[in-house]
Image (cartoon, rainbow, N blue to C red):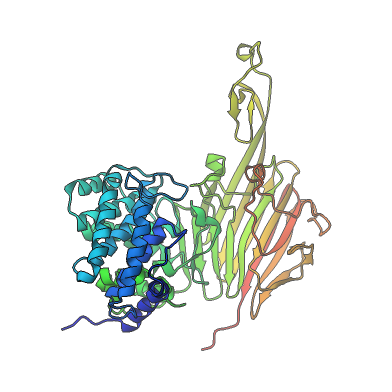
Amino acid sequence: MPTPLDHAFVRSVARAADRSAAPLAARPDEEPAGVPHRGLARRVKTLVAAYRSPDSALRGSGQAVAAAMTHLGALRAAQTTTGLFAGGDNVQSPPDSAFTVNDVCDAHLLAAGAGPELSDVTAALAEIADAASVSLLTGGVHTPNHRWELCAALARLHRSFPDDRLLDRVAEWLTEGVDLDAEGLYSERSANYAAHVSNPSLLLLADVLGRADLLDAVERNLATTLDLIRPDGTVETVHSRRQDQNHPFPLAPFLPHYRLLAIRTGRGDFSRAARLAAADGIDDPDLLAQTLLTPDLCRPLPAPTGESLPRDRYLTTARLAARASATAHTVVYGGSDVPEHRRIRSGLACNPTFLRLFAGDAVLDAVRLSRGFFDLGPFRAAGMQQLADNRYRLTETLTAAYYQPLPTDQRRDDGLYRLVDEGRFSAAMAFPDRPRDEVSHTTRVEVDVREDGADLRIDISGPRVPWALELTFRPGGVPEGAAPIGDGRWCLTTGPMTYRVGDDEIQVEAGVEAGEPLAGPDRSDVLRYDPGQDYTVVGGTDATTGNRVYVGGLGPHTLTVALRARRPAPVV
């Protein structure tokens, strides 16, 4: 009995590939000038998949083969004498080349044995793979996810060109252990790298090596990601340690992983996620090759299970809480790496957003708290404590110092002392050897997450310094009840305001429990976001864009902020 197929899915996948491959096949001799090596290999893979697919308009197309050969010529020219590929800011990079070799090997598997028309393509792919194999076998990496991408390339090389040395090297990397924490997050906590690198690499390794534990790791990550899916069809990234921490990331790249595991395990929640990932259509041209290489993807999805609301999740390892209800979706975050490392750095979680609120089309994208304390930047919680169900406390204490004269036995006649970074700036003053007078500033934010929003109690203690709470709303509405202060900014004092988009709205009301009156709209020196000197010293910023509403003053202060989502009742 033939295996049932999801024909609508298969046709959509083929159309997505054709949209990419058909223009290339229409101009098969056109040199792909300026296309990086990874793009060249992906194009070849898509062209070969389209040639092989019964559902593609390029099925059996000689022009598709000719276009593939043209791109293979450019790809071979990009390969250096080491077998690694030139291009990009990572010089002589084994992992960057591994991305390309993964596609080369997949294309080789699709082309091999497909008939004499693809014999030249098969030979060219084998030549490229062979030239890269030694460098990948011995090469190193520089990010956590690179290990799994490199292992996947070695496993694919072994699959097409068996060599036990390749498997031995994979085993060497894998014995380090997959970097999945107790909550199911990879160490980089990045939706982008989970979707594009770690999950697909581990799925491939599980298949080639017969490693059920690697399959389980992917399933755990996907299960956690379910609780990070936001109402707008994106995946939460505020806790990421990579580039996506400041940008929304779509759910669509998770489609093949949710779909495959839903089909193989019968999980209805994964089926629901797969349907949501494909809700706006299928645009990834690589999915066609994936369906040919993994036919299970073409089987019908199991019945999806409905989403149970309200739903709560607190990820202790990332210090991120999410609560979803029919009215609101709220995220509370206190997991920045900056308080511990005292620096902004690639590979650290640096985003100072500590709350988001979704109310249908009305979206509060970011709540941040800026302080004018020694230019050390906005509030980033050093700790997050769960006080009760859906109630959290975020805390950060900043310290800066004034330094006393060096002890007598540490002084030098020539006045030449060590150049030292003291956490705020660097100077040739041998700071660790000096007595210090410290100045401290503590911020505590208690968040009570409700079904219709959140209540905040913000306590700012320490010297009298300016502070500003910034609420950044997604464009599409206008704050009503707040005073405009120019450049897409508004000032809120103690009166209520509403941000309305269509029939959806978010209401905000602030109150002072202790401290001076709040700053009015004439205090532009207070009502602003300051990214801190780690950004400003190089002329940079991590400031948000959108409609920004400020509440500010001169601390110390104790402030309450009520955030309420309002949406029309669902039609039954």
Q: Residue at x 25, y 48 (%)?
A: 170
Does 295 appear above or below 215?
below
Can residue 390 be seen here?
yes
**Can residue 389 be seen?**
no
Report x, y in % for residue 260: 30, 70
Which residue is pictured at 51% across the width and 54% down the height? Answer: 243
**226 or 124: nearer the viewer:** 124
Q: Which image quadrant: the N terminus?
A: bottom left
Q: Nearer the viewer, residue 510 or 172?
A: 172
Q: Quadrant of residue 20?
A: bottom left
Q: Looking at the image, how many numbered discs can be counted on the residues? A: 0
Taking depth in this image into account, of 229 and 384 the one nearest to the observer is 229
Q: Who's the residue at 73% across and 56% down the image?
A: 513
Q: Position of residue 152 (x, y in %)?
A: 29, 55
Where does the image place residue 261, in percent across and percent down from the top left? 30, 68
Give the residue furthest to the right.
522
On the picture, is 439 further left or further right than 256?
right
Q: Is residue 49 above or below residue 76?
A: below
Image quarter for residue 206?
Answer: bottom left
Which residue occupies the extreme front position in the image? 29
What residue appears at the point 48 percent right and 52 percent down from the top-left corner? 242
Q: Quadrant of residue 2?
A: bottom left
User: Could you say where residue 486 lies in the image, as x and y percent from the top left?
Assistant: 78, 63
Horizontally, residue 518 falls left or right of residue 231, namely: right
